[in-house]
Image: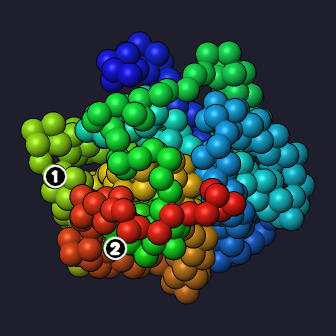
Amino acid sequence: MQVSHNVGKTASVISVFLFFLMLINFLDKVALGMVAVPIISEYKITPWQFGVISGSFFWLFAISGVIGGFIANRVRSKVVLFVLALIWSVAQPLMAVSTSVVGIVVARMLLGAGEGPTAPVAAHACYKWYPDRQRNLPISFIFSGAPIGLLLAGLIFPYVTLHLGWRTNFLMLGAASLIWAFLWLRYGAEGRVEMSADSREMADKNRRVSYFRLLMDRTVVGVFLMNFTSYWSLGLTFTWLPTYLQKGLGFAPQTAGHLFSLVVLLGIPTNLALSWLSQRLLMKGASSRLARAILAGCSMTFAGLVFCSLTMFDYSPMEKVWIIGIAAGFSDVMRSLGHAMIAKVSGPSQRASMLALNTSIASLAGIVAPMVTGWMIQSATFSSANGYETGYVINGVLLVVAGLIGFFVLHPERSQQKLSSPDSPLVPECAR
């Protein structure tokens, strides 16, 4: 099969569908954080308690992500993504009609269960259409739906909350998921680029390496660690950034919404530019270690240092907004490059499950980060910026450590060669 047969009009249509899927996915994730102030006021809860409620989204996220990934190894991506979108369309209206904290937690847990497999299965679906050296830009485009979703959240949710109430946001999101699901059912398709000469990650497509051997590989472990710290940044964005802009920096609700969009907007060109640079290097013959691993390590180390500077210098409120936006943009590129490295190492027959494990382990940061930062905010008093900024500094330290570790442990080509060697233990048929 020729690559050009797959990388064409249909591949582009699929990429656009997956872009909108990620856009809705991240609107879903950030919605609770965007209405944090009215919810905290209405239910009379503390910042730490709200951090726990926000983290409930991730209680089933990791488990469902792993299960969904293994299912996607055998079931068409089109079917898996359709079912996931249907779950979102049920969970969000439940959130809208909830009248208690318990109801909110249940709705967020259901949403998390439905969204856990989304990113890895979307990446898996994309990789079916593109060979290895052409994957960085398509996957970056698809994942750019995430920051654009966050950008739209900053523009739409404050307006809707002000004029129609915070619950209306969740009804709108449920409707958007349902519309996407049925359009995808009609127009979605599966790619079959796997056996082209350029995209054969393993010598034999049907060969499956022991999962223990995969999970003990240094590149896989390093990517998991780096994605965890990158997801910590996302956890802060989802849960505390909107409130930080209002309570910490003193901006009015709608102004805070616009500044939230600015933070997200700053990250989009950064992510796309770094992904373009990575793909450009690959197309010119650079190794995946240089074009992906070293680039990701540099980006995360830089992001961590920028986050740490929040408490080192006397920035104005607007300067702090810019600082967070720049750091978040450099941190976020790891999601695109990390998925590409996992896909290269694991091969097509085990790719969906390994991508799911990558996302699921990273998502644990979404449980821890809101609670840790909530405790910091509560200790520093809810109206002070100090607690929020301490949370970002903790994130910064984690990013620097992970980025430096990445320099030494990530070597995708070496891992691929080792795992595809004839003496690599195979997975028994019952474990596939």
Which residue is depicted at the point 87% across and 58% down? 103
Q: Reading the chain from its start, which is encountered first: label 1 or label 2?
A: 2
- Residue at the limit of the structure toward the front, as seen here: 422
Local secondary structure at mark 1: loop
Q: Position of residue 161 (x, y in %)?
A: 68, 41
Q: How many other residues sit within 10 Å of disc 2, few (<14), some (14-19) or many (≥20)?
A: some
- Disc 2 marks which residue? 218
Q: Position of residue 373 (x, y in %)?
A: 52, 76
Quadrant assignment for the N terminus: top left
Q: How many other residues sit within 10 Å of disc 1, few (<14), some (14-19) or many (≥20)?
A: some
Q: Position of residue 44 (x, y in %)?
A: 78, 69
Which residue is depicted at the point 64% across and 23% down? 184
Label of residue 287 in the image? 1
Please identify the quarter of the rendering in which residue 139 is found: top left
Please identify the quarter of the rendering in which residue 389 is found: bottom left
Left or right of 354: which side holds 139?
Answer: left
